[in-house]
């Protein structure tokens, strides 16, 4: 385990950071325990306060087997939305974009299935997830792994058949499609690709030297958590997903972002980002359910502390950035493994680092019980179907064909197989997305479908044989 704890004058650390440096050791120990408990091969983490990295660590290995370091790039998932929001707000502050003008002013070709809604959606609606575009619509255009020119525009054009779930501005629903459209807006307004504009306006000013913004940038494989262990996985890069999730960054890179966010856009003594743009992204907004969503940040309380945060996942990676503006404090935790069943557990790591710094115990959260148990239940059900169908068929051969019983096996197995095949759709996904994000569930479904097909075939033969025998005896 490689740990670097910077020796700063503890008397300069005010607010939530402790006077006892043993709390830094406790953070190091917690992260290593978390990594092992949740089968994460590699973790990088940092604490920033008053413009300084006061604690930084890296443990484990990347998908190539190399030790994790503060320079190792990770895909940061929806934390990328924070960067997209910064690019949009800086364009707005420069007078190049009006947040309250329809998106069609910048993208005349932008179209949903509802013409009226299409004409009324604004960048502000997109920034705050109040456009009326649903979460499921975002999933439909995500994870395309399209790295050809105009990939973002192609993905946005594929929203033309999406029917909004509400009027623009009427309600909140988180959807990556909102930030996908913002990526196309940035391209239109800036006259260049989103990759180039993001690099020039945010990444380079923040000296993010290890950022990955295209399939040409080095990025080690991540890991998918399935059947209780981590499996190396490298689906490739997705340029069409850069505005909402496919941005790579190292721990060092993200500490630069945190420093700028906590100091009105200043980094390393220079004004790296527009101060008004940074301030506007952090201003409190109307409460939405449990959390408020502003421009690229969520707001919630961690044990009474107001925090701004965003987490994000891609198949193989998970990232969390957490800010405590009132304490001039930030926490970054990067993990190179992911499963939707472990989402809450992986996400809680950053908050637990904050709790330990406040000399409070970390909070334990459980895995999603449905997603965690589903693969095992599906495989066990498949085994039960195969063993039951086989035993029934053997009895039928010894004692004579029971046509009615075999018909029941055919009907029941067929129905169960169809239901299993439709399970991803019932959960709001499709078969390809299930294979990408939950391979263990996909394997379980596939195993059950095959088992049911074999049961149908086996007892179908018996039914055919019984029918033939009946015809002969009556003929």
Image: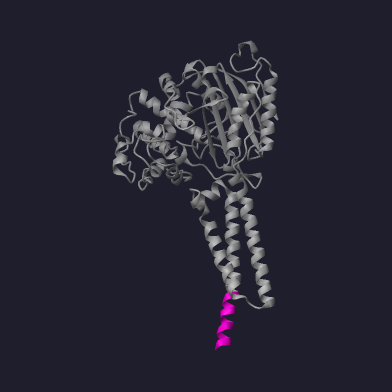
The image's colour scheme reads: one colour
Quadrant (top left/top right/bottom left/bottom right) for the N terminus: top right
> Toward which corner of the image does residue 192 lie, by quadrant?
top left
The residue nearer to you, when weighing 376 against 236, is 376
Extreme residue toward the front, this view? 404
Task: Report if residue 472 lies within the magenta region.
Answer: yes
The residue nearer to you, when weighing 475 against 177, is 475
Question: Can residue 108 be seen in this snapshot?
Answer: no
Extreme residue toward the bottom, this view? 475
Give the residue displayed 34% in from the left and 38% down from the top. 167
> Toward which corner of the image does residue 383 lie, by quadrant?
bottom right
Give the residue displayed 44% in from the left and 34% down from the top. 195
The residue nearer to you, when weighing 181 against 370, is 370
> Toward which corner of the image does residue 335 lie, by quadrant?
top right
Q: Position of residue 211 (x, y in %)?
A: 52, 31
Question: Can residue 240 be seen in this snapshot?
Answer: yes
Compared to residue 281, the image places residue 151 above or below, namely: below
Compared to residue 429, the image places residue 282 above or below, namely: above
Q: Position of residue 151 (x, y in %)?
A: 42, 42
Give the residue displayed 57% in from the left and 82% down from the top. 468
Query: Is 471 on the left-hand or right-hand side of 94?
Result: right
Q: Position of residue 87 (x, y in %)?
A: 42, 28
Extreme residue toward the top, this view? 11
Quadrant (top left/top right/bottom left/bottom right) for the C terminus: bottom right
Task: Report if residue 328 lies within the magenta region.
Answer: no
Query: Is 393 on the left-hand or right-hand side of 172?
Result: right
Q: Position of residue 191 (x, y in %)?
A: 35, 33
Compared to residue 141, the image places residue 84 above or below, namely: above
Q: The magenta stretch spans which residues?
A: 462-475
Q: How many marks?
A: 0
Dominant secondary-structure state across the stretch colored magenta: helix
């Amino acid at each position: 385990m490689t740990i670097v704890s910077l020796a700063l004058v503890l008397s300069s650390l005010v607010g939530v950071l402790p006077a006892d440096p043993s709390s830094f050791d406790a953070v190091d120990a917690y992260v290593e325990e978390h990594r092992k408990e949740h089968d994460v091969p590699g973790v990088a983490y940092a604490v920033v306060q008053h413009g300084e990295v006061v604690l930084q660590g890296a443990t484990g290995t990347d998908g190539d087997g190399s030790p994790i370091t503060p320079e190792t790039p990770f895909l940061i998932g929806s934390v990328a939305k924070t960067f997209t929001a910064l690019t949009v707000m800086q364009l707005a502050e420069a007078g190049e974009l009006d947040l309250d003008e329809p998106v069609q002013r910048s993208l005349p070709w932008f179209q949903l299935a509802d013409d009226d809604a299409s004409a009324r959606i604004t960048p502000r609606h997109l920034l705050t997830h109040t456009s009326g575009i649903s979460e499921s619509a975002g999933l439909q255009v995500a994870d395309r792994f399209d790295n050809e020119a105009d990939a973002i525009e192609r993905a946005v054009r594929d929203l033309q058949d999406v029917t909004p779930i509400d009027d623009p501005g009427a309600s909140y629903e988180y959807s990556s499609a909102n930030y996908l459209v913002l990526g196309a807006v940035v391209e239109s307004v800036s006259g260049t690709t989103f990759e180039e504009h993001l690099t020039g306006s945010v990444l380079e000013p923040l000296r993010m030297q290890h950022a990955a913004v295209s399939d040409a940038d080095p990025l080690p494989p991540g890991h998918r958590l399935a059947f209780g262990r981590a499996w190396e996985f490298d689906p490739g890069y997705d340029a069409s997903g850069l505005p909402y999730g496919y941005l790579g960054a190292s721990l060092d890179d993200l500490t630069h972002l945190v420093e700028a966010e906590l100091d009105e856009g200043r980094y390393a003594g220079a004004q790296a980002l527009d101060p008004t743009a940074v301030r506007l992204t952090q201003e409190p907004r109307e409460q939405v359910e449990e959390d408020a969503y502003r421009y690229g940040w969520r707001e919630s309380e961690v044990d009474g502390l107001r925090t701004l945060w965003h987490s994000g996942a891609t198949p193989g990676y998970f990232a969390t950035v957490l800010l405590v503006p009132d304490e001039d404090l930030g926490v970054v935790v990067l993990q190179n493994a992911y499963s939707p069943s472990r989402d809450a557990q992986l996400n809680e790591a950053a908050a637990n680092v904050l709790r330990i710094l406040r000399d409070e115990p970390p909070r334990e959260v459980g895995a999603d019980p449905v997603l965690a148990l589903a693969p095992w239940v599906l495989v066990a059900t498949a085994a039960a179907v195969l063993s039951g169908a086989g035993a029934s068929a053997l009895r039928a051969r010894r004692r004579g064909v029971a046509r009615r019983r075999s018909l029941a096996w055919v009907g029941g197995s067929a129905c169960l197989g169809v239901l299993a095949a439709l399970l991803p759709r019932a959960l709001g996904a499709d078969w390809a997305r299930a294979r990408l994000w939950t391979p263990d569930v996909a394997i379980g479904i596939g195993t059950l479908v095959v088992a049911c097909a074999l049961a149908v075939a086996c007892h179908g033969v018996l039914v055919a044989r019984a029918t033939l025998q009946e015809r002969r005896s009556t003929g």
